[in-house]
Image: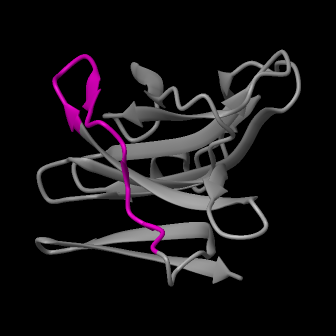
């Protein structure tokens, strides 16, 4: 499952009890790799990987607009059909959520045929009651000279620039 806890001046410096369960525990592989980011105006965004019943994990998102007291916006970012993992998120000045994640099940060409990681990106726009997500795009494109295994992305928004870093393995 996915749990959320809050500590702050509104709580007299104490952690909330009990923790808020955002996603109930499910079957394997369940919820993994949660990532949380806070921005102005009491916005908190969480992204995570989740797969149940033996299904490959997808990337999910939840947004709180009241500093973590409630989480009315929750949903899937992309149903990729493969094992989406290690999401990272950043929020821009307009409240747009930028998310990257790793898909380790991408086929890499060249001898011998092998699978490796690919990094994908999607942007979420808050439409009031839901988030609308852009079609995921691959940002770690393989070329004849670049047949690397891309893993563990991180993202930041710096003014109007979106910057991503990730590791590559041969």
Q: Is residue 8 visible?
A: no
Residue at coordinates 65% horizontally, 35% vertically from top-left?
Answer: 82
Residue 25 image-quadrant placement: top right
Locate residue 169 relative to residue 90 in the image: left or right.
right
Number of numbered discs on residues: 0
Quarter in which the C terminus is drawn = bottom right
Of 2 and 160, which appears nearest the observer? 160
- Residue 132 is a magenta residue: yes
Residue 63 image-quadrant placement: top left
Location of residue 1 in the rendering, given as x and y in whole percent from the top left corner: 77, 28
The magenta span reads 125-143
Residue at coordinates 64% horizontally, 48% vertically from top-left?
Answer: 34
Location of residue 135 in the rendering, given as x and y in whole percent from the top left corner: 30, 36
Location of residue 85 in the rendering, given as x and y in whole percent from the top left corner: 65, 49
Residue 24 image-quadrant placement: top right
Location of residue 6 in the rendering, given as x and y in whole percent from the top left corner: 58, 46
Locate residue 168 relative to residue 97 in the image: left or right.
right
- Residue 69 is a magenta residue: no
Residue at coordinates 46% horizontally, 22% vertically from top-left?
Answer: 75
Residue at coordinates 69% horizontally, 33% vertically from top-left?
Answer: 57
Of 40 and 18, which appears nearest the observer? 40
């Amino acid at each position: 499952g996915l749990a959320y806890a809050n500590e702050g001046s509104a709580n007299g410096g104490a952690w909330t009890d009990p923790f808020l369960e955002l996603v109930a525990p499910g079957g394997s592989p369940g919820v993994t790799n949660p990532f949380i980011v806070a921005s102005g105006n009491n916005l908190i965004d969480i992204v995570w990987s989740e797969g149940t019943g033996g299904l490959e994990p997808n990337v999910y998102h939840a947004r709180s607009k009241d500093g973590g007291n409630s989480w009315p916006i929750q949903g899937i970012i992309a149903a990729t059909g493969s094992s989406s993992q290690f999401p990272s998120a950043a929020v821009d000045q307009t409240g747009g959520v930028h998310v990257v994640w790793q898909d380790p099940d991408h086929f890499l060409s060249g001898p011998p045929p092998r699978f490796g990681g690919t990094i994908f990106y999607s942007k979420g726009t808050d439409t009031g009651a839901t988030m609308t997500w852009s079609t995921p795009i691959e940002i770690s494109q393989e070329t004849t000279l670049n047949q690397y295994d891309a893993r563990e992305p991180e993202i930041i928004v710096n003014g109007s620039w979106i910057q991503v870093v990730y590791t590559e393995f041969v």
